[in-house]
Image: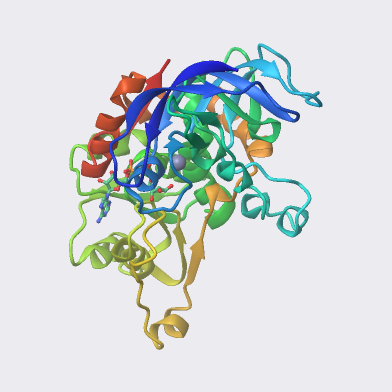
Amino acid sequence: MSTTLAAVVRAPGEPVHTAEVALPDVGPGQVRVRMAAAGVCHSDLSLASGRLAHPMPAVLGHEGAGQVVALGEGVTDLAVGDTVLLNWNPPCRACWYCANGEPYLCARAADASGRVWGTLADGTGVHPCLGVAAFAQETVVPAGACVPVPGDIPPVEAALLGCAVLTGVGAVRNAARVQPGQSVAVIGLGGVGLAAVQGARIAGAATIVAVDPVEEKEELARSLGATHFLTPGDDLARRIRAIADGRGVDHAVECVGRAATIRAAWSCTRRGGTATVVGIGAATDTLTLNALEVPHFARTLRGCMYGSSDPAADVPDLLKLYRDGQLLLSPLVSRTIGLEDVGGALADLHSGRGARSLVVF
Ligand code: APR
Ligand code: ZN
């Protein structure tokens, strides 16, 4: 047993605060990681606000990297000192989905979120955000949640791979399977959307329309590969179609998590095009499609979890793109913060300010 500082939310809608948490020693099959850096993702905000249900109280953070400091019994494929990034959706490799080649849909991946991760000073148990609890000086995770990263990769850059990049680049490459010369619209330019813009550039898309209400994001989006930038409005879908020969884009990637932007993603694609939904919205926010348009436009509406990725296989591939200079990580970080600033970073996400805030330990 030892204590660690962590960013805790007591109940949905309550402010996040820094608290000391007693962390048990690693159990069998677990790994203790000293965090180096962790990105603040919109899903942290959604969990803190209660928009997405999660066992509470919780230690936030699910996108991070650090160093292995202790191994539980039976963990043989990692060593103390290894740099790892955290996978918030670790596949069990045994369920129907894993056997079917869809580890991102693993039936057991969410189990780790329900466990008691540590204990607050008043004796209350806390749960780890998406099984990971990255906003803590040290965390204990299942070994399967650790993805080794070569020692020469700075952990502050590796951290972003854990959610934003696997999700955004994966949506474009694994789910949409964008082909060279195609047109892509990316709606929502947070960490996930800006990664999707890069994924589209890496896939060889000829036209990349980036959309966000925050106009300051234009320059960054263009530097990462966007060929056009639009702010949303009633006629967004029509304006995107106009850029894509009036026909519509081959692919739209929704990275906001709202019915209205999913609708725009659907409507801006060409007949036979594909809208890939990455954003995670509220169960009460309903999308309407009429019975004529679905067959007439012959589009595909595709949901996408964690970039349809298997981090064990995708991270080495992403790191190769990073080393080749194709995948840029540091521009995704708009500011670095301390653990005590997580609440402010969540407020920034709420207002759409900046790209990723990165907690550096
Ligand atoms: N149209 C386009 N963009 C919008 C709109 C809109 N109507 N409303 C908000 N946005 C922009 C915000 O300005 C912001 O830049 O969407 C972006 C969302 O970015 P972040 O809040 O940084 O979210 P991110 O962490 O990138 O996650 C995006 O993916 O994994 C999910 O839960 C996550 O739903 C979230 C989504
Ligand atoms: Zn995330």
Q: Is residue 325 visible?
A: no
**Tag count:** 0
Q: For the point 42% across and 49% down, which residue is it?
A: 206
> Which image quadrant: the C terminus?
top left
Q: Is residue 180 left or right of residue 336?
A: right
Q: How is the image coloured?
A: rainbow
Q: Which residue reaches farthest front?
A: 122
Task: Classify 2 as above or below 18.
Answer: above
Task: From this view, report whether residue 69 is shown above or below residue 120.
Answer: above
Residue 222 in the image: state x and y as whole percent.
30, 38
Residue at figure coordinates x 78%, y 55% from the top left: 99
Asked if residue 28 lies left or right of residue 328, the reply is: right
Q: Is residue 183 above or below residue 311?
A: below
- Nearer to the camera, 199 or 138: 138
State the image coordinates of residue 344 (x, y, percent, origin top left).
25, 30
Residue at the bottom extreme, as displayed:
292
Quadrant in the rendering for residue 113:
top right
Pinpoint residue 187: horizontal percent, then vertical percent: 33, 53
Image quarter (top left, top right, bottom left or bottom right) of the N terminus? top right
User: At which x and y percent is residue 209?
Assistant: 32, 51
The residue under the point 35% across, 71% down is 286
Q: Is residue 346 left or right of residue 23?
A: left
Picture residue at 81% right of the left edge, 23% below the top: 76
Query: Which quadrant of the structure image shows residue 280?
Result: bottom left
Whether residue 228 can be seen here: yes
